[in-house]
Image: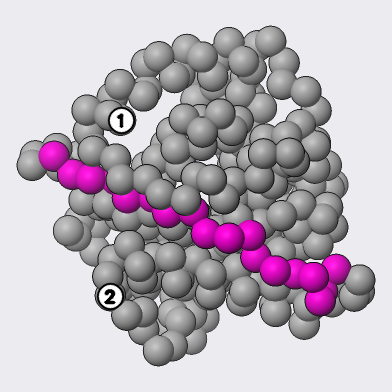
Amino acid sequence: MTESRRSRMTFAVLAVTVRPIMNALMAKKWSGAEKLPRDTGFIVCPNHITEIDPVVIGHFLFNQKVTPHFLAKASLFKVPIMGWILDATGQVPVDRTTAGANRSLEAAREAISSGGGIVVYPEGTLTRDPDMWPMKGRTGAARLALQTGAPVVPIAHWGAHEVFPRYAKRFYLFPRKTSRVMVGDPVDFSDLVDKPITKTVLDTATERIVDALTVLVAELRQEAPPAERWNPADKHQKSTGRDYEGNTEETQ
């Protein structure tokens, strides 16, 4: 999938309007950009701590001359203006029906083949961990990687939650915050690529992705991660949506 003229123009307009806002909101401390693949499309796996994460990651990738494509809920494509922007920039709608899932996978493959970065949040939603560490992952990113052979690059970030806390209703602009982004080495799946894509293989690959991401987050935070990864199922929490046990709407 080659980027269309419409997509390039829309990204250019967004860059002119959104980048100055992001630069004003947060200082930048970015590292590891040299680890991004430059000769192939790849899968980006970031941690997920607040609703503005896609803007932070998109800003970082665009500044590295990588066209960002996100897997986004199909319902968002029906929202006025937002839906048009998502469609115009070649974002990938995720439909949970069987036929829709196949279309989403094909669109993701096309985005990878275009040489851009397809962004897949391995946790699937905002982390439920009370301390915002990466929680137990879902297998979507691992499946896409094993089916396409595309490298998986973990990218951790920290600081956006101070501007817009998880599930908040307003921004916290002062004092000015810092956006910290760190790119890790591609995750090694060399021992898995020739195996049938079973649940065990997918779980193993997913654990490696989240492990790599957790190491980066720990380095950004200068803290040790918890000994046991948060699992919403073990805590009797819903896997999606804002209504889950222990949710507080505004935390800093």
Q: Is residue 122 left or right of residue 243?
A: right
The x, y position of residue 93, in whole percent, is 67, 38
Q: Is residue 179 left or right of residue 194?
A: left
Q: From this viewpoint, is residue 79 visible?
A: no
Residue at 42% x, 54% y is 182
Residue 55 among those drawn in magenta:
no
Please tell me which of labels 2 and 1 falls first in the chain.
1
What coloring was used for the rendering? one colour
Q: Which residue is mark 2?
A: 223
Residue at 36% x, 24% y is 19
Q: Which residue is mark 1?
A: 22
Identify the amino acid type marked 2.
Glu
Alpha-carbon span between mark 2 and mark 1: 26 Å
Identify the amino acid type marked 1.
Met
Residue at 28% x, 24% y is 21
Residue at 70% x, 79% y is 204
Whether residue 205 is situated above or below residue 145 in the rendered picture: below
Residue 217 position by quadrant: bottom left
Q: Check the image and name the residue furthest to the left.
A: 175
Residue 182 among those drawn in magenta:
yes
Mark 1 burial class by Cα count in 10 Å: few <14, some 14-19, many 20+: some
Element under disc 2: loop
